């Protein structure tokens, strides 16, 4: 698109602002690193996980769409690809976690392990070199998948060669399997091992669903902006928002299903190894967050998304998506932060600065990627046909 | 020549070309209305009926002698009864998924398989229900499970998932039956109008509830059907979630796992689709329904089987990893015991049949071969039974106290009861095929060009069956 359209102008402005805000917050974080080293790493971890979600979730949703098809996917594919292309940057943003292993993870201290029989028995998995190798491996796999898929999609757009399409399908199938496994283990490493005695077999799925939800919210937010501008107002229709809204509803329900069943099973088992996880998270002020999650991350969006009209109104859906996207942050805080503070609920200014820093950089890069390439994945004629084709 | 729409290349049609409203109606109703019942039907029904007699004998023996005739012992208090219950109820889930969820997702390929998949659900639930009912020991007092104000001032334990099972399964059976019946009403009217014999005309006429195909009838029908689909959808998840909680709320290693609910639901859909295929493949062959249950159906179902099979495999992986990661002696011992203990052959057979064999479905060649699909589905059916066996028996037979360890195997009466329910299932299916339209006639009619529901038309004039598009790949 030419640089004169209002959309290009808006995006450019957004990119500039995002980089500025992100850069400013990053400087604050750097100050934080010297003022309160431990807190810096803790807040960074939360911010990192929060912003990894839309990038990695985009990879997953694109692969899922390559397998299932459906009109909803074609409209958002390009913007999801723009999010996928931030993965190398996120790999760089993961560096502080590797540098902060000592501050974050109890199991990394030899003296702690020496006095803890359980940690000794987990040492083959929970040790610093293997942790680093795994983190590098996860990102290598994700970046490989993202790059390959984008390149194949570009080739298909150019040549309409069915062979490229077949390879996309093949790669997406295997890619989804890889994503499920790597993201599960990544969540065990980055999140679950913060409380190294505790474990839950559903933990990885919780992260995966959260990433899907973040991605859908992002897609709805971006689409609701794009739809105000000329070419997109003709291409993005109410039915696309409706489909995205339905998917959001499905992910909200899945999130609640997983969260509640985990809680119920831990509660009824009432085992000393497991209940501390919920005890710390339902006392000393953390219960407020839990309640906010139950009401605003499940109950309210559930009822709002049941209405057909709400799903078909871009502004309503986008407002809800924005709130849900921010609530994902509350969920990450509630998952991660209590493992550092077993006493009172504790939030630091860095808990705001770090996500804003990462977020600013991320949004800047995402906007740059959006500007870099056409936002609709195929030329108009094909898209028109798609519009007329039956949904799903 | 226009280029194909992106990612939606010509797909094999959900109904073979050349069919009209009349040909569909004739083809499906003739199976029910023609006078001569094929000899094969009598042979099949005869065998199934004999097995129902085995079932009745087993139940009689059980009621005379008590559950002592089963192989249960002290650590293993849950044996075949719960294994078979979970196996059967899981099979039912595909029917509900196909009829409700695929309807809401506007997947028109569900149309020719939903009717008999729903029937399968009902019959599977009936078979499943037999086991807990008998396992309570005194089935004539089974109503004690239901909370009602009684002179004994006793209430069931509301915190127990076994009670939730009573609600979940009875709701499931009710909604499935309603869904099935409501879906049948327009077809009952078709049968009523086509029946030659007066008796059948009266019976089908009563079942059709005075259906005349008026616009108002259709409008109400559509509303009712969609509402029922909405009601049935949560049941796909809830029933097997509750079943999984039967295990997961305990503290038994191998049972107490937070992944159980979604993993059980995926397993249920997995086994259910395998059973739908197991039934669909011979049915379409025997009754010449290849035009209606096309390769596209079989391929789509194969993909669902592959996807849910991978979720189940993810569950096994997590179980094994966390048994180690827990660093808990009992958890590790349980996993080790599964892999090398007395039931190791069952465990590895389960891994082969549920994880390894379905991987062949990645290959398009395998998905296009009816024989290969049939074999894989049979293997999956067995594998899912083994899964429940491994979960139930390995965890119980070696519990926390080595002094109370014991091995378990089903007795002849365990097996006869199980095989008897298979006979019940088959007998009900044979009756269903003979007396009811096994494919929804009016919904199939919407698939031909000029059918009532416009959105379906697109697929009807798509490419022929063998022109599988690239999206079918992988």
Image (tube, rainbow, N blue to C red):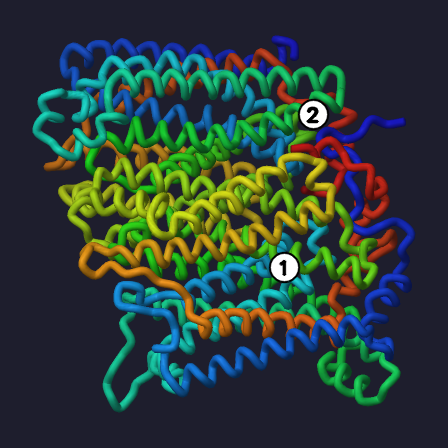
Q: Position of residue B472 (x, y in %)?
A: 70, 36
- Vertical order, B445 against A117 (above or below): below
Q: Chain of mark 1?
A: B
Label 2: how many Cα within 10 Å (few below 14, some 14–19, many 20+): many
User: Viewer-proximal residue, B135 or A19?
Assistant: B135
Judge the density around disc 1: few (<14), some (14-19), many (≥20) Cα neighbours within 10 Å. many
Confirm whether circles 2 and 1 share one chain.
no
Of residues A159 and B145, which is closer to you in this image?
B145
Name the spot of residue B148 as percent of width and height, x first: 33, 83
Q: Is residue B415 above or below residue A388?
A: below
Secondary structure beneath label 1:
helix
Residue under label 1: B99
Residue lying at the far bottom of the rendered structure: B151
Is residue A347 positioned above or below B401 on the image? above
Is B239 placed left or right of A97 in the picture? right
Between marks 2 and 1, how big is the CA–CA gap?
Answer: 31 Å
**For mark 2, what is the residue?**
A165
Determine which quarter of the picture holds residue B244: bottom left
Q: Is residue A331 visible?
A: yes
Where does residue A67 sit, x and y in percent of width and height? 62, 34
């Amino acid at each position: 698109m030419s640089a004169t359209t209002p959309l290009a102008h808006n995006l450019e402005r957004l990119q500039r602002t995002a980089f500025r805000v992100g850069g400013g917050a990053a400087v604050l974080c750097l100050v934080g690193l010297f003022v309160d080293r431990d807190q810096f790493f803790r807040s960074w971890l939360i911010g990192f996980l929060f912003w990894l979600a839309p990038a990695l979730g985009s990879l997953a949703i694109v692969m899922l769409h390559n397998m299932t098809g459906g009109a909803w996917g074609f409209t958002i594919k390009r913007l999801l690809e723009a999010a996928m292309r931030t993965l190398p940057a996120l790999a760089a943003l993961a560096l502080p976690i590797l540098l902060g292993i000592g501050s974050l993870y109890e199991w990394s201290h030899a003296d702690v392990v020496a006095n803890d029989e359980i940690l000794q028995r987990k040492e083959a998995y929970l040790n610093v070199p293997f942790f680093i190798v795994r983190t590098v491996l996860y990102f290598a796999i994700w970046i490989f998948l993202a790059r390959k898929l984008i390149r194949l999609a570009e080739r298909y757009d150019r040549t309409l060669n069915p062979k490229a399409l077949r390879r996309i399908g093949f790669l997406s199938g295997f890619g989804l399997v890889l994503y499920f496994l790597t993201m599960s283990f990544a969540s065990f490493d980055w999140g679950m091992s913060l409380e190294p005695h505790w474990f839950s077999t559903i933990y990885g799925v919780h992260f995966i669903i959260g990433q899907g939800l973040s991605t859908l919210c992002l897609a709805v937010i971006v689409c609701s902006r794009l739809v105000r501008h000329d070419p997109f107002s003709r291409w993005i229709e109410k039915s696309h928002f409706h489909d995205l809204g339905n998917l959001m509803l499905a992910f909200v329900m899945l999130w609640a299903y997983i969260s509640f069943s985990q809680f119920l099973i831990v509660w009824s088992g009432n085992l000393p190894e497991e209940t501390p996880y919920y005890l710390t998270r339902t006392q000393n002020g953390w219960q407020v967050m839990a309640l906010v999650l139950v009401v605003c991350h499940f109950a309210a969006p559930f009822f709002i998304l049941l209405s057909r009209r709400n799903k078909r109104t871009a502004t309503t859906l986008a407002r809800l998506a924005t709130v849900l996207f921010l609530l994902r942050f509350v969920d990450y805080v509630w998952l991660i932060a209590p493992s550092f503070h077993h006493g009172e609920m504790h939030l630091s200014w860095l808990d705001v600065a770090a996500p804003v820093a990462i977020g600013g950089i991320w949004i800047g890069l995402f906007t740059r990627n959006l500007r870099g390439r056409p936002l609709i994945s195929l030329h108009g004629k094909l898209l028109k046909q798609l519009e007329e084709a039956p949904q799903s | 020549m226009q280029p194909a729409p992106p990612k939606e290349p010509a797909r094999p049609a959900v109904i073979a070309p050349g069919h009209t409203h009349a040909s569909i109606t004739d083809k499906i109703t003739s199976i029910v209305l023609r006078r001569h019942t094929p000899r094969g039907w009598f042979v099949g029904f005869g065998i199934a009926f004999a097995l129902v007699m085995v079932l009745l004998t087993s139940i009689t023996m059980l009621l005379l002698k008590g559950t002592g005739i089963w192989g249960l012992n002290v650590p293993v208090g849950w044996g075949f009864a719960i294994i078979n219950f979970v196996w059967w109820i899981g099979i039912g889930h595909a029917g509900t998924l196909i009829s409700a969820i695929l309807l809401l997702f506007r997947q028109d390929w569900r149309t020719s398989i939903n009717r008999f998949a729903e029937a399968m659900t009902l019959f599977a639930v009936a078979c499943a229900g037999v086991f807990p009912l008998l396992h309570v020991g005194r089935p004539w007092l089974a109503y004690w499970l239901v909370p009602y104000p009684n002179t004994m001032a006793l209430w069931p334990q509301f915190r127990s998932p076994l009670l939730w099972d009573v609600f979940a399964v009875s709701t499931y059976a009710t909604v499935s039956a309603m869904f099935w019946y409501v879906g049948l009403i327009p077809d009952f009217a078709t049968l009523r109008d086509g029946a030659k014999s007066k008796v059948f005309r009266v019976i089908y006429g009563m079942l059709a509830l005075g259906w005349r195909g008026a616009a108002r009838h259709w409008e109400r029908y559509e509303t009712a059907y969609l509402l029922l689909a909405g009601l049935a959808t949560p049941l796909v998840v809830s029933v097997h979630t509750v079943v999984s909680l039967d295990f997961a709320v305990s503290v038994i290693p191998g049972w107490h796992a937070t992944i159980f609910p979604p993993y059980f639901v995926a397993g249920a859909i997995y086994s259910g689709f395998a059973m739908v295929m197991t039934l669909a493949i011979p049915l379409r062959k025997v009754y010449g329904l290849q035009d209606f249950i096309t390769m596209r159906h079989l391929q789509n179902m194969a993909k669902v089987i592959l996807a849910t099979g991978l979720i189940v495999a993810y569950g096994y992986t997590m179980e094994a990893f966390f048994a180690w990661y827990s660093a808990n002696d009992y958890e590790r011992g349980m996993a080790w015991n599964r892999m090398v203990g007395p039931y190791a052959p069952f465990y590895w057979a389960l891994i082969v049949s549920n994880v390894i064999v379905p991987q062949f479905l990645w290959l398009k060649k395998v998905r296009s071969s009816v024989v290969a699909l049939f074999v894989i589905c049979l293997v999956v059916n067995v594998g899912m039974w083994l899964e429940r066996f491994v979960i139930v028996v390995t965890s119980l037979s070696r519990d926390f106290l080595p002094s109370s360890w014991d091995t378990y195997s089903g007795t002849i009466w365990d097996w006869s009861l199980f095989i008897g329910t298979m006979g019940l299932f088959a007998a009900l299916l044979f009756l269903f095929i003979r007396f009811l339209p096994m494919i929804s006639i009016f919904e199939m009619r919407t698939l031909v060009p000029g059918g009532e529901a416009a959105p379906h038309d697109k697929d009807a004039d798509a490419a022929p069956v063998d022109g599988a598009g690239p999206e079918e790949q992988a």
